[in-house]
Image (cartoon, grey):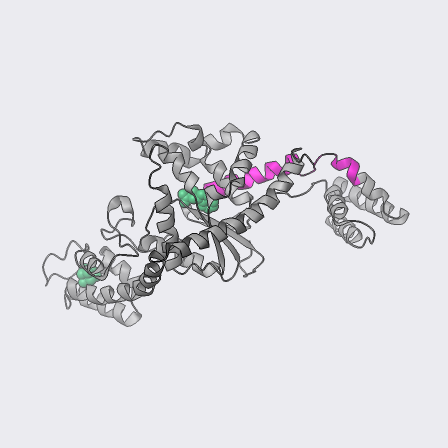
């Protein structure tokens, strides 16, 4: 996908409902979403069905976690006036597309998705030997394809899922793109062209299909475009017939790889709830203060007058995100020369993190006090998403012989 902003380009991404979010989510995902929403048509959703693929025995927290997560999206600046936020399970068409895609998805494609075996090995305490878990990436494909999204911002761990989505789309278009009676309809459309144009069209088609001459395709397309008395549907068919491709019903999306956040957790590992090393977006000032002041530093700096090495200290990674050059220079020199202590070093950081969190927490508090507003935003998002999903499903049903009209 070209990176030039285009408000017509649709972007979609989702998150499993993990509840309240932390700074890792903010720097890794939400800041990116908040930026994308002003340049593209954005859809962001809570993948609550995906939570059930690994936690079907424990559904109790899903709804609350979904709402809390959306509050944090809003707090971080995702704007309901610019982006559509919705909940997967509230747009049932995702399930219908998932089912229909499952008919034509080779088992082996799902079995070879890396997360299938990886997760089964990692999460041994969970029952992942289910049909739903095997279908996880296919459900994700349905999530993406139902919006005909051009771009999917995701982290490294999700790229394989976007890749299988592309394969599914290609297979779908190949099987159903020509639709029922495609050849007959194309021939009928050709018959509507004038005699001369018809001859020229057939010549270009032959030249392209037999000799692969690209200019033949161009001439043929221009010719179809210039036809006066031919419907849009027939034109699409004529172009499909020209290159023997049929119609693209589900476009292939691009993964927009989001660089991993450079901010580690409080212990230097990746920030993650399961490691207990997070700063939450809604942690109060005292908590943030305490967490940062007890945060791990360069283990070689045991005493105040031991010199340290910022490269071996997770605090330094925080400074790289939160501090200006002047402060960073002060940290580097002070640390290496033992001119400053770790508490001194952390103080400007505490200030900076709190200043960054303050407006978010203010927004979050407003939404906490007004749960109806949050529900209204989500309901509106569900509606807007459903509208798009329904359009896609109308077409999918048609080409799969399920239109019944
Ligand atoms: N699997 C994604 C994750 O765990 C969540 C997800 C579900 C998603 N459907 C999606 C992400 C569609 C992008 C697009 O993070
Ligand atoms: Fe880390 Fe700063 Fe202490 Fe150096 S002075 S070890 S960078 S906290």
Residue 248 location, x and y as percent?
65, 43
In this view, the residue in front, 7 or 71, is: 71
Magenta stretch bounds: 160-186
Corner quadrant of residue 367? bottom left
Quadrant hosting residue 122: top left
Viewed as shown, does residue 194 lie left or right of 80?
A: right
Q: How many marks?
A: 0
Quadrant in the rendering for residue 300 = bottom left
Image coordinates of residue 80 in percent, x first then y, are: 46, 58
Residue shown at the point (44%, 56%) measured from the top left: 33
Pinpoint residue 286: horizontal percent, then vertical percent. 19, 60
Q: Residue furthest bottom?
A: 326
| Residue drawn where x is 81% and y is 39% of the image | 187
Q: Is residue 316 magenta?
A: no
**Residue 24 visible in this rendered orientation of the protein:** yes
> 324 or 178, which is in the foreground?
178
Q: Position of residue 299 (x, y in %)?
A: 16, 53
């Amino acid at each position: 996908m070209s990176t030039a902003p285009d408000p017509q380009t649709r972007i979609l991404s989702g998150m499993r409902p993990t509840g309240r979010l932390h700074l890792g989510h903010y720097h890794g995902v939400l800041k990116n979403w908040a930026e994308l929403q002003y340049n593209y048509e954005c859809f962001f959703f809570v993948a609550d069905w995906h939570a059930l693929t690994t936690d079907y025995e424990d559904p109790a927290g899903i709804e609350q976690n979904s709402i809390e997560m959306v509050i944090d999206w809003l707090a971080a600046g995702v704007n309901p006036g610019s982006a559509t936020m919705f909940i997967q399970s509230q747009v049932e068409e995702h399930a219908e597309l998932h089912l229909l895609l499952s008919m034509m998805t080779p088992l082996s494609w799902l079995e070879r998705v890396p997360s299938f075996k990886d997760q089964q090995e990692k999460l041994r305490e969970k029952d992942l030997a289910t049909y739903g878990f095997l279908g996880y990436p296919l459900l994700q494909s349905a999530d993406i394809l139902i919006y005909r999204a051009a771009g999917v911002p995701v982290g490294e761990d999700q790229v394989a899922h976007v890749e299988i989505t592309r394969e599914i789309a290609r297979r779908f278009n190949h099987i159903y793109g020509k639709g029922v009676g495609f050849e007959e309809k194309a021939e009928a459309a050709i018959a509507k062209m004038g005699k001369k144009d018809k001859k020229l069209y057939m010549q270009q088609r032959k030249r392209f299909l037999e000799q692969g001459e690209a200019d033949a395709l161009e001439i043929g397309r221009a010719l179809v475009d210039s036809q006066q008395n031919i419907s849009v549907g027939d034109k699409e068919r004529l172009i499909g017939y020209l290159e023997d491709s049929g119609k693209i019903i589900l476009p292939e999306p691009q993964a927009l790889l989001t660089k991993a956040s450079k901010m580690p957790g409080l212990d230097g590992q990746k920030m993650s709830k399961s490691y207990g090393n997070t700063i939450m977006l809604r942690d109060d000032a005292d908590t943030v203060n305490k967490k940062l002041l007890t945060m791990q530093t360069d283990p070689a700096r045991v005493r105040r007058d031991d010199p340290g090495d910022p490269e071996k200290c997770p605090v330094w990674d925080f400074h790289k995100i939160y501090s200006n050059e002047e402060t960073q220079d002060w940290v580097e020199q002070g640390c290496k020369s033992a001119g400053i202590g770790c508490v001194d070093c952390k103080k400007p950081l505490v200030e900076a993190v709190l200043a960054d969190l303050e407006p978010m927490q203010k927004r979050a508090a407003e939404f906490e006090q007004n749960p109806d507003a949050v529900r209204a935003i989500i309901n509106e998002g569900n509606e807007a998403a459903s509208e798009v999903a329904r359009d896609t499903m109308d077409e999918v049903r048609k080409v799969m012989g399920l239109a019944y009209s």
